[in-house]
Amino acid sequence: MDIQDLSQRIAAGERRALARGITLVESGRADHRAQATQVLAALPRDRQALRIGLSGTPGVGKSTFIEAFGMTLVQAGLCVAVLAVDPSSARSGGSILGDKTRMDRLSREAGAFIRPSPSQTHLGGVARRTREAVALCEGAGFDVVLIETVGVGQSETVVAQMSDLFVLLLAPAGGDELQGVKRGIMEMADMILINKADGDLKPAAMRTCADYAGALRLLRKRPQDPDGYPKAMMVSALAEEGLDTAWADMQALVSWRREAGFFDATRAAQARYWFEEDVRSALLSKLDDATAKRAMEQLGSRVAEGALAPSAAAAQMLDVLDGNFGPARVDPVPDSP
Amino acid sequence: MDIQDLSQRIAAGERRALARGITLVESGRADHRAQATQVLAALPRDRQALRIGLSGTPGVGKSTFIEAFGMTLVQAGLCVAVLAVDPSSARSGGSILGDKTRMDRLSREAGAFIRPSPSQTHLGGVARRTREAVALCEGAGFDVVLIETVGVGQSETVVAQMSDLFVLLLAPAGGDELQGVKRGIMEMADMILINKADGDLKPAAMRTCADYAGALRLLRKRPQDPDGYPKAMMVSALAEEGLDTAWADMQALVSWRREAGFFDATRAAQARYWFEEDVRSALLSKLDDATAKRAMEQLGSRVAEGALAPSAAAAQMLDVLDGNFGPARVDPVPDSP
């Protein structure tokens, strides 16, 4: 493959080249990974998209919202990429976003690019792949990248750590369901959107919105928020209501943060965070090597038998790793710790 | 220090020697750690205590329970050690168990040994130290080791992974508070004890007990449980009621698991788990070295400035670590990723 050619075509905004680049990024093969690194390095680094993280559990109408919100952006002349972080997709047999036909209109727009979640269970890997896919979309000149997650386990934290704005999408609920959203998630949200504020559900949506607005006021004020944020508001993806207002409010928040210096500071802190995470996972990946796995298995069996204490076996394993996985160090382990 | 002498005195059951050994185990100093490893290696390995993990949030009467339950065991002729895992103790300015006077009677018993939680915030370190303290208590000939935790964050999982039995202590509650206990914690529990089943609280304790008994029946049956387990029952530490029954039920469960092979299998799996955890944390501790920290800081700053991509910087950091932290590798990093 011609890396230079692929990078140039991605930088020119070619959708198929971008899709190819993301496939490289998502691949588990070492040669693909190396090519992905080269592609990323060859892309223009002066392009910046607004990264919006979007979390919502199944049933809140997330696909409908992304389609309607994406159309709002496209109609405003912006290019929008939609990426999914769904650590459960391998289990559930398909991504929430796997079915592009659920975003029928948006996927046919020239200004839009929709990429389903890769089938991966390991969240750490998903995080790196998604970050690199975001970087590819930025290099391809997108104005907005929507990173959606289904909110399983730690996936919200992962998405929030790679987003400029973190938006929580909720459905209208009974009065006592406020506690369904964990406090930690509430604290990450820059904006809470109550979807389905239409028809019969409108009264419930109003109550839910008021409940969350109240809950947000109770949280400690964050330095990165101007007055009135984080904010809870109602939208209807179905009736296409409130989307313009939501977008205007997002832009107002981003402008304020840019001027106050929080936007760049947050990106810098996020980059540093991912660097440290990458170092940690690279260190741990030394255990994925076949020889290392064999040594772990051998030593682990001796520990399980009680012949060796866990900490003593760990010290021996570190010797094995430091000695370039020399198998001679593994077999003749002494019997006492 | 004479390691051999210390080990022999611990093995002879001397309380002060045991306390000294635990201090070594808890120390952050490398020479103390090396001595601790030697002490552990010199102890008899054929002694086994029943390890009971006990979780309960503040307010459930945990200290009172441990005292009353510990006295039950001591009066049955058993030697009991009480250890605490409290990752919050550094923050809250003192361990739950820091005040031995709250276990006034038990601490005066010759057959009892009470050790407060060390002031540590890092749960990983607490886990290793507690495991080694448990091993010291076993080497000292204790029959039962109670490992208590306050249930902050992941501490219950840590304690359950080093216990033969995991007991959840709860207070009587209103009917709708069942959800206060996370499902994951319920699934770890071998026994749920509703404390304070005395006086005015008795009716509430009966309701709470019935609620949890019902909830436990809804969980999927685990292979390691005979009929009727996991079990919810009422106790009153204050009135000293139900403690004999609870202990008899614990013994019945342990006997069944021993005969069915689950007891040894679980210990083997736990030892293997801790070996793997120790290897992972030893790998990550390569980043604690002063030179490594400096390199992380330098590369992290370049990443934060946008001069280097996180993954490219991580690759350079790995080179630094593999090259024995040679600082020459850090400074002249090229500007592009």
Image: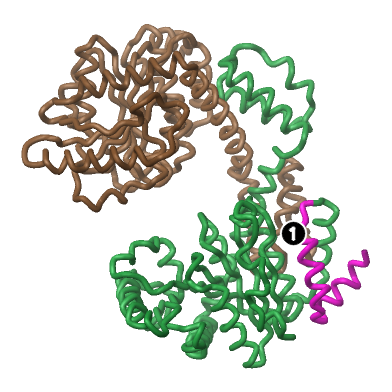
Chain colours: A green, B brown
Q: Position of residue B275 (x, y in %)?
A: 58, 28
The image quarter in which residue A293 lies: top right
Does residue B233 appear to the left or right of A269 in the view shown?
Answer: left
Q: Position of residue A49 (x, y in %)?
A: 65, 79
Q: Residue furthest bottom?
A: A76
Q: Which residues are magenta?
A: A1-28
Query: Between B182 and B305, which is closer to the camera in this rendering?
Result: B182
Badge 1: few (under 14), some or many (20 or more) residues near its Cα, within 10 Å?
A: many
The residue under the point 35% across, 29% down is B229
Q: Position of residue B168 (x, y in %)?
A: 31, 35
Residue A247: say if magenta: no
Magenta-colored segment: predominant secondary structure: helix
Residue receiving disc 1: A26
Does residue A148 appear to the left or right of B69 in the view shown?
Answer: right
The image quarter in which residue B111 lies: top left
Q: Position of residue B144 (x, y in %)?
A: 33, 18
